[in-house]
Amino acid sequence: MSKAFTPTPARPGVITANDLREGHNVWMCDGGWTPDPKRATVFEDEAIADLALLDAIGQAGLVVGPYLVEAKRGPDGPEPVHFREAFRQRGPSNYFHGIQAKEDAHV
Amino acid sequence: MFDVRPVETDYVRHRAAQFRDQVERRLNGSLSEDEFKPLRLMNGVYLQLHAYMLRVAIPYGTISPDQMRTLAHLAQTYDKGYGHWTTRQNIQFNWPRLVDIPDMLDALADVGMHAIQTSGNTIRNVTTDAFAGAAFDEVTDPRPYAELLRSWSTDHAEFQFLPRKFKIAISGGKKDRAVIAAHDIGLRLVERDGKIGFEVWIGGGLGRTPMLGKVVRDFLPEEDLLPYVEAIIATYNLSGRRDNKYKARIKITVHERGLDVMRAEIEEEFLARRRDFRGADREALAIFKDRFRAPAFRNAATEVYEAARAANPAFRSWTDTNLHPHRIDGYASVVVTFKAPGQTPGDASADQMRLLADLAERYGHADLRVMHDQNVALPHVHKSDLPALYDALKAAGLATANAGLTSDIIACPGMDYCALATARSIPIAEEIADHFRAVDLEEEIGNLNIRISGCINACGHHHLGHIGILGLDRAGVENYQITLGGDAYDIPAIGERAGAGFPAEEVVPAIDRLLRAYLEVRQDASERFIDAYRRLGPAPFKAALYPAQADA
């Protein structure tokens, strides 16, 4: 589903993946990958997003399964559009112990 | 109790060492993710919504106290303090780091456990009745046969790349508690003219095309078990569809080609293959039967149990719901449900696992069973020990008297954890359980199986629920379809879709209307929901679910 997403100015997107060693969710940001989705780089241009995704795929030593996903601009940074991505960012609804419970840090 | 042999421990240690090397090569760049993925899946390692997930096999659900303590150790050391029982007698750890998984596999190997074939298109964990060796209605203990199948299928060279995953279940009781009709192969132990054998079912399965299995052999002598099962899987391996993942299970092969065609091919293959089985399998079966020797049951008075039942209504309620009759007088099998208020169905903390290990040693002949319905059983407890066992469980929050009741819900991890899910299961299960406890209707409703899946793959077995709930994504919103009339145990049945789905916040009110309608229309308190549904058909229940349509 999300992997077919194409960003436009009206529907910007971010690139997300799982960290290879830890498994947790990360988002592409300036200078690498962050577990904080608010710090994710927002893409509006399809060509630039495709190049960034190719770059992400090339970082197989750091991340697994990168893909583009729709986001919307919020006051503190990009926010998820689809509930699946909201759950990925927030962590499971039965326990407060996903990445939401951790201090952010760059990969 | 089953004893793990040194050769088996050596084998799983070897496999763990292989995987450690594979992880190192993935991390140093020698293996790409595409190369590594099938290797990690061969060791039960998935990459899920938030993290890696390790699925550990608990063959036929039988687990010793030391093995349970090892699971507790893994939960505490490498996860977030808990594990999750699955419907196929596995445990899943939801948060391990890839770099830690080789250490986890080493720890499992120390107690003869592993994650081999808990994933991939191969023969998965062989499951059976959680009360095996204890049940009052048992033809014979199914676990030696399950162990024979496990030993034979582990790393079976011919069956490592089947068209799809392959699941086998064995039932030893006259009542099926292993859900054999929903498995690729279901084996029901039967006795004919004093001889033990199997009624063999094939082609059952759930998912997006739910089907009940069909009887392909009404009596298979026990000595022919391996060659016949091998013939079934070999036939499927050749004729199963590899062109379409969603049509690759044996249920589709049986459906498309017909049972008679499949039966003829299986019988032909069986005759050819039986010659290759020269008796070693029967020798192995004899050894396994000896290894599953019954514990030394004791003959003791049960007055303390009867006195406690008379004096303590809470204890009596727990014994009414959570005990299963044992084949030995004075004994019972105890169901410990992991469905307490506020608890994620099937989640067990490290402390709870350790407590169960201790209690099994103290009161249960050091035997534990992981159940199909995400609970844990102590199969052999003398009734005189039940008051003390109950007190210990109650102190730990594990004495919830709800086995088989409304809140004893099977729920898959759903979109809270699973990368495939399209909606959440856990919050819906929790809300339903909380609601019916709050309105104090659970006891009045009585036996009821609610099953919830977070996607069409049906890991929560919603098709087999008296009430099934399927979570879907409808235009970016969680939506839940309800099925009625499914049955896993008594008369196997696939539930029928009741109508349009409900938004998440409307599921509990809908189930409330449904069950209040059941209380109105049932003949008396002994008529279960599923019995009333069978007697009356779906109309009164659909009317309750969709009152606006009924009024129109």
Image (tube, rainbow, N blue to C red):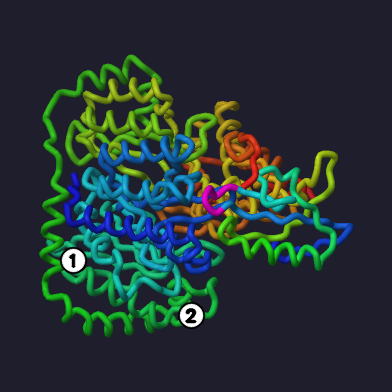
From the viewer's side, name the closer residue of B514 and B457.
B457
Image quadrant where residue B272 sits: bottom left
Q: Is residue B549 visible?
A: no
Q: In terms of depth relative to the viewer, which is nearer, A37 or B445?
A: A37
The chain to which mark 1 is attached is B
**Amino acid beneath label 1:** Glu
Residue that mark 2 sits on:
B256
Q: Estimate the x, y position of residue B143 in percent, counting from the top left.
A: 23, 53
At 72% from the left edge and 66% from the top edge, which residue is drawn?
Answer: A4
Q: CA distance from mark 2 to mark 1?
A: 29 Å
Crowding at label 1, few (<14), some or many (≥20) Cα neighbours within 10 Å? some
Magenta stretch, overall SS: loop
Q: Residue at x 33, y 55 (%)?
A: B16
Which chain is mark 2 on?
Answer: B
Q: Which residues are magenta?
A: A20-24
| Tally of numbered discs | 2
Do marks 2 and 1 share a chain?
A: yes
Residue B544 left/right relative to B130: right
SS category of the residue bearing label 2 = helix
Looking at the image, residue B485 sits to the left or right of residue B259; the answer is: right
> Can residue B184 be found in the magenta stretch?
no
- Of B550 and B209, nearer the camera is B209
Please give the residue where the numbered disc 1 appears in the rendered image.
B222
**x and y percentages locating residue B286 in the rendered image:** 11, 59
Q: Residue B504 lies in what quarter of the image? A: top right
Quadrant placement of the N terminus of chain B: top left
Is B88 left or right of A3, judged from the image as shown?
left
